Amino acid sequence: MKVKGVNNKDGERIGYSFKCPGCKDRHVIHTGPDTAHPIWGFNGDVNKPTFTPSLLTRCGHFVPGHENEPCWCTFYKDSPEAAKADKAFRCYICHSIITDGRIQFLDDCTHLLAGQTIELPDLEEVKESEN
């Protein structure tokens, strides 16, 4: 299984999540019903998922309107020891297209997998690598 279902507090399926191998963050892709978020198309296959359109995630100073505000980069510049922590927050752009269980990282990504296409890891593989 490549993606895991996400339910709201009433138990309704609102989307799917996965641990991104590029930015190392967990992404939630909303597939509905939910009026608070954009809705993505989903082929219904948790082993070879396809979501449309692309998924764009921004954090820190990459969020539109926050370019000149304090962010994780400025925090860690003042606290370099905190930046070494395994769970340190990062400013990033992660832009991808997920098709048939493969994740294509677009060139505007700020992580090392920008421009590459790889197999989306199975959730069991991700869980083992986190230990």
Image (cartoon, rainbow, N blue to C red):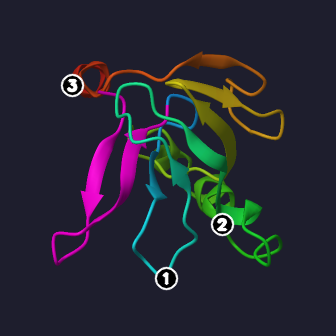
- Which residue corresponds to mark 1? 36
Dividing the image into 4 quarters, which one contains the C terminus? top left
Q: Disc 3 residue type? A: Asn
Secondary structure of residue under mark 1: loop
Which sits in the foreground, 40 or 121? 40
Answer with left or right where residue 116 lies relative to residue 37: right
* 2 in magenta: yes
* Circle 1/circle 2 CB separation < 8 Å: no
- Mark 1 residue crowding within 10 angstroms, few (<14) / some (14–19) / many (20+): few
Left or right placement of residue 64 versus residue 84 in this view: right
Up-down relation of residue 60 to residue 87 (above or below):
below
Distance between the alpha carbons at the discs numbered 1 and 2? 25 Å
> Of marks 3 and 2, which one's residue comes earlier in the chain?
2
User: Residue 107's image quarter?
Assistant: top right
Mark 3 and mark 2 in contact? Answer it, CB < 8 Å: no
Percent coordinates x, y for residue 44 in the rendering: 39, 42
**Left or right of residue 69: residue 21:** left
Q: Which residue is mark 2?
A: 71
- Measured along the vertical axis of the image, is residue 104 above or below residue 53? above
Please name the amino acid that badge 2 sits on.
Answer: Cys
Which is nearer the N-term, disc 3 or disc 1? 1
**Is 33 a magenta residue?**
no
What label sits on residue 131 in the rendered view?
A: 3
Distance from the alpha carbon under mark 3 to that under mark 1: 34 Å
How many angstroms separate mark 3 from mark 2 (CA)? 28 Å
Helix, strand or loop status at disc 2: loop
Residue drawn at x 59%, y 54% as measured from the top left = 76
- Say if 64 sits above or below 93 in the image: below
Q: Which residues are drawn in magenta?
A: 1-20
Position of 115 with respect to 28 (left or right) is right
Please tell me in which quadrant of the rendered image residue 71 appears.
bottom right
